[in-house]
Structure formats: structure tokens, C-alpha cells
Image: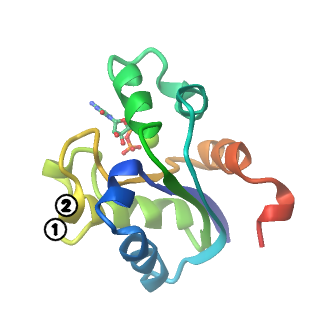
Amino acid sequence: MERTLSIVKPDGVTLNVIGEVISRFEKKGLKVKALKMLHLSKEEAKGFYIVHKERPFYGSLTDFMSEGPIVVMVLEGPQAISLVRETMGATNYKDAAPGTIRADFATDIERNVVHGSDSLESATFEIKYFFSAMEIF
Ligand code: CDP
Ligand code: MG
């Protein structure tokens, strides 16, 4: 069993696909173990994406991630990290496989609807960033 963190980003909330995204994960057999809606400050978005602090898109990405509410969740299942990444599709929606969330809903390389942890190490950091042990079921 593995746990991973996923986010419906502000564009996904505006596009009204919160349920659609969660449903796609559930259909893959993933279980929702924690869930909440929140609106990140710019500083909170910067902290979440700290691994990207040297990247040219860091400023724009953290503006985007703090522009409106998001939905964050912990998902659990066998190979949850890679399963969520497959369900999301490639970072650039133009490269995302047909039928993936990003292929279907993303509008820009940045505004790509969904986040998923990319490794066990990042999943551990990201889950702790949003949830205390008492909030995970
Ligand atoms: O989200 P993912 O792990 O697929 O990609 P990332 O390389 O960790 O980048 C994090 C986020 O930054 C992406 O999901 C995009 O929203 C944004 N990004 C961007 O705006 N321009 C890029 N060239 C790469 C990423
Ligand atoms: Mg990433």
C-alpha cells in the first residue's frame, strides 16, 4: 500500500471538475483517505513548490496556485504514486495521453488541473504539508 497527495488546482475548481477528478481516481481503485478545500496564500504555495524555487516558472506557478481555492487529498492504493501520475497525464497537456485528466481538461502547461506527488519522498513531504495524522483516515 502506498499513499500520495493529489490536488485539484484552482483552474480545475473553476472548471467544475472536482468530482470528475476524484471519480477518475476512485475508478482506478484508489481510496480517498483525507480531503479538504483551501485557498493557499502566495507564501504557502511557495512552500509547497519549494523544490522548484530555482525554476523560471516558480513565480508564475505560485501566483496561479494561490489565485483561488484548491482541493487537496490523500489517496491510497497499490502503487498509488505512479497510478495517480498515469491518470493525470504528462505535465504539458499537449503531450498527455488521450483519456488522461490533463489531456481532457488542461488549457496550458501551467494550468493543468491536477497535481500528484512524483516520488515516495515528495509524497511524504506533501501529505505532511497539508494534513496532520488525525486528519488521515
Ligand atoms: O506537476 P508535474 O509534476 O507534472 O510537473 P512539475 O515539473 O513538477 O511542475 C510543477 C507544475 O509547474 C506543473 O504541473 C505546471 O503547473 C507548472 N509548470 C509550468 O508552468 N511550466 C513548466 N515548464 C513546467 C511546469
Ligand atoms: Mg511535480
Residue 64 spot, x, y in % from top left: 37, 35
Q: Amino acid at mark 2?
A: Ala
Q: Residue at x 60, y 32 (%)?
A: 44
User: For the residues carrying marks 1 and 2, which lies nearer the camera in this image?
Assistant: 2
Residue 69 spot, x, y in % from top left: 49, 50
| Image quadrant where one finds the N terminus | bottom right
Left or right of 4 on screen, residue 107: left
**Corner quadrant of residue 75:** bottom right
Nearest the camera: 32 or 28? 32
Residue 103, which numbered label?
2
Q: Secondary structure at mark 1?
A: loop
Vertical placement of residue 131 versus 111, above or below: below
Vertical placement of residue 48 versus 112, above or below: above
Q: Secondary structure at mark 2?
A: helix
Q: Earlier in the sequence, mark 1 or mark 2?
A: 1
Please rate how many residues cluster around mark 1, counting C-alpha atoms within 10 Å: few if below 14, some from 14 to 19, many from 20: few
Query: Mark 2 and mark 1 in contact (Cβ < 8 Å)?
Result: yes
Residue 98, which numbered label?
1
Residue 110 spot, x, y in % from top left: 28, 38
Residue 65 spot, x, y in % from top left: 44, 39
